[in-house]
Image (cartoon, coloured by chain):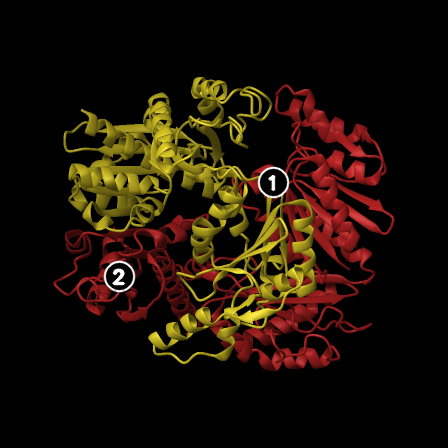
Chain colours: A red, B yellow
Amino acid sequence: MRCEVLAVGTELLLGQVVDTNSAWIGEQLAGAGIDCHFQAKVGDNQPRIVTAIRQALARSDAVICCGGLGPTQDDITREAIAEVLGVPLELDEEIAGRIEQMFSGRGRGMALNNLRQAEVPSGAIVIPQVRGTAPGLICRLGDRTIYAVPGVPGEMREMVGRAVIPDLVSLSGVRATIASRTLRTWGMAESTLAEVLAPRLTALDAAAGGGSGAVGGSGAVGGSGAVGGSGAVGGSGAVPTIAFLASGIEGIKVRITAKAPTTREAEAAIAAEEAEVRRLLGPVVFGVDDQTMEAAIGELLAGRGLSLGVAESLTGGLVGSRLTAVPGASDWFRGSIVAYATEAKRKLLGVGDSPAVSEETALEMAAGAAAALGADLGLSLTGVAGPTEQDGQPVGTVWVGMHSASGDDQARLLRLFGDRDQIRQIATISALDWLRRSLVDLSDS
Amino acid sequence: MRCEVLAVGTELLLGQVVDTNSAWIGEQLAGAGIDCHFQAKVGDNQPRIVTAIRQALARSDAVICCGGLGPTQDDITREAIAEVLGVPLELDEEIAGRIEQMFSGRGRGMALNNLRQAEVPSGAIVIPQVRGTAPGLICRLGDRTIYAVPGVPGEMREMVGRAVIPDLVSLSGVRATIASRTLRTWGMAESTLAEVLAPRLTALDAAAGGGSGAVGGSGAVGGSGAVGGSGAVGGSGAVPTIAFLASGIEGIKVRITAKAPTTREAEAAIAAEEAEVRRLLGPVVFGVDDQTMEAAIGELLAGRGLSLGVAESLTGGLVGSRLTAVPGASDWFRGSIVAYATEAKRKLLGVGDSPAVSEETALEMAAGAAAALGADLGLSLTGVAGPTEQDGQPVGTVWVGMHSASGDDQARLLRLFGDRDQIRQIATISALDWLRRSLVDLSDS
């Protein structure tokens, strides 16, 4: 089963908007075991949209058109699909009624062109909208299928997950449910992860009957593609596959996917494999699916009834801004003192005469943050983000300090590489991960 | 002149990496007056890369292939281009020598596969690398051209700017230099910007001889495309064009582009138009080209010899982290106190008993930040980021306070819309912009 993605919108070609939708859809297709060999972008121009759809259908079983379903004259994906199908557009009374209701419910008058969104190519299956006003479309053309979803990311994701992927999976003929879970990791290189998980990869590959996706082959554990092969599931037992997704500053994701006749069986296979993977990876795993590092920390702090205060220097507020991105952070986050000037470090944090980038200063900042902010725990960062060295310390030198009420204060040295922005970002996530691991240890003890 | 973009890499299709290169190249092509009607992504698969290049050349004059030039077996863009051209790959001794030198210069042994990067399709023009090890390529095929550039964004941008765009412009037959300047704005809606600049758009269109890109026509001022038309320049005078690019949280960009026989004439035309646009827009313009809001503030503060202290609540450190993204921020930034807990607001900032989200508290926080951090100016933010209201204040209510040594303290109320992240981001940029405008006024007085 092959499916392409066509992102529609002149703003994408002009670089005014970066197309993130195709990447997201590509990830979903890969997770569902559907091949995606080409993705394209085209402007709001009917002949070119028609050309692009025809090209996609000439080499793949399906194409997902993303964008161009809105109410304005620029939104012509519907017209282009109708042309490819060779059918007229027809007003769908049900959609029209829903759009009219939506506007009257908000006490607003409706511009007539909103009804354009109720026009569908004759014979199309409508994917009802649950957010926004534009419905999606499923259109059959012989054994090929054209999908249309809105370009607004939230609406697109909801619709692809609810209707498009299930339809593709059903068309693929595999009578199975696909479920997946992503374990998020920080602190282990991709090659090490692959090495540590090698026993599982070998075991899964053997269980799946070997063949495609052999472990150890070139590229098999190189970050692309699932190990185990998509056709790995036999008639009965669900053999999961494991794939790695390097996600830069967000760490490396380990995705476990399972196909099974029922959701319950798929979920059970995933749960069993997750336990194995967690046993091998240990505290490297910080979260599941969309859970962020800061959300994981928030849960741990709230669970222990602990509060946190932060002292930042080179990160300038990045640590605090990530922590406060978590709704309800005020339950456990007291604040952060961004002490850029030396005088501010002394006055607000009680730091002494040690060099600004040193173990002593990091320890004093952590204790000072906890004291000044009235928090149980203190976390501190001081270092050299660049572009030039500072007090003889090279760019990338970062000390992280941690203070706890028990008096078991610690500091650790990081040597980071990259430009100013990268060093600040990696220092932030590294400090947060150290805090998280300390909290896990605290919970275990 | 039409040019397509082909991004090469399986990781792009799998959604592990979002392709931002194509968007950037699209922006450069638009700025140079070159049409880009299609962009595509393809995996590391030679037959499919060949198909995609042939498809692009069948409908456009050129294609820029981005990625797949590295040293590993996965990097096969060179091979695919050679196949399209019908020529063999040949080792370029000069490139090979340079790669060997680079490794020996770093005292590292070189894996033999690095020499793959020295293989070029017979007859290709080499774009020498100035960063990284992979050179770029310019390959003619009849009246068509295939460009190849690395996928690493920094290397790609340098090479496209230095070699690809100039080659395309020269092929386009317009014996002219193209120059452009982007004025960055904050605080005016796109429709208002278009209205305010309407006299200029009309004047430029008239000077260019009307015709294409008529102002007032549908979409002409709607954010896409240049007003004035790319073929507007006659033999002698350079008539600039103006385009709007909505860039979300980064504001709206107003790009002035001019074609002229010489760079000096193009620059002169841009300078004259920039003066007109600035006269109409006034302090809405905060920067030029890649200058950020925080860099503009840094320049103003440094120029006045003033220092800044910040007090943040709902933004949790975002204001400080943006300001410290500017190299050399320590010259004018003293620090930020992120007071999330009420007790911290009292103790560190000397805030009294007023409600947390109120004009009084914002004023007290601003004065408290300046005092605690020993700064000339204090900037504060307090508000409700959501997801739930706070003390009867609806989500999106934000007070921004400013303190100066002159005692002319002020606060202003923002009512923002969006989710937690959007409210925090918009509050941050709005507060920074207010500070910037105050500094401009200060400089003018």
Give whichever of B20, A103 is nearer the camera: B20
Q: Are marks 2 and 1 in contact (CB under 8 Å)?
A: no
Instruction: Identify the residue at image location x=61%, y=71%.
Output: A274
Give whichever of A423, B418 is nearer the camera: A423
| Label disc, if present, on residue B435 of the rendered structure | none
User: Measured from the top left, where is residue B33 in percent x and y?
Assistant: 52, 37
What is the three-letter code of the residue carrying label 2? Val
What is the three-letter code of the residue carrying label 1? Val
Give whichever of B71, B41 is nearer the camera: B71
User: Measured from the top left, where is residue A329 in percent x and y?
Assistant: 41, 50
User: Measured from the top left, where is residue A238 in percent x and y?
Assistant: 74, 71
Subunit ID for the residue under disc 1: A
| Label disc, if present, on residue A152 of the rendered structure | 1
Q: How far is mark 2 from mark 1, CA to CA?
A: 40 Å
Image-based side of B200 in relation to A396, left or right? right
* Rendering quarter of residue B275: top left
User: Are the numbered discs 2 and 1 placed on the same chain, yes or no?
Assistant: yes
Q: Which residue is mark 2?
A: A384
Give whichever of A311, B159 is nearer the camera: B159
- In the displayed structure, A141 sits above or below B122; it is above
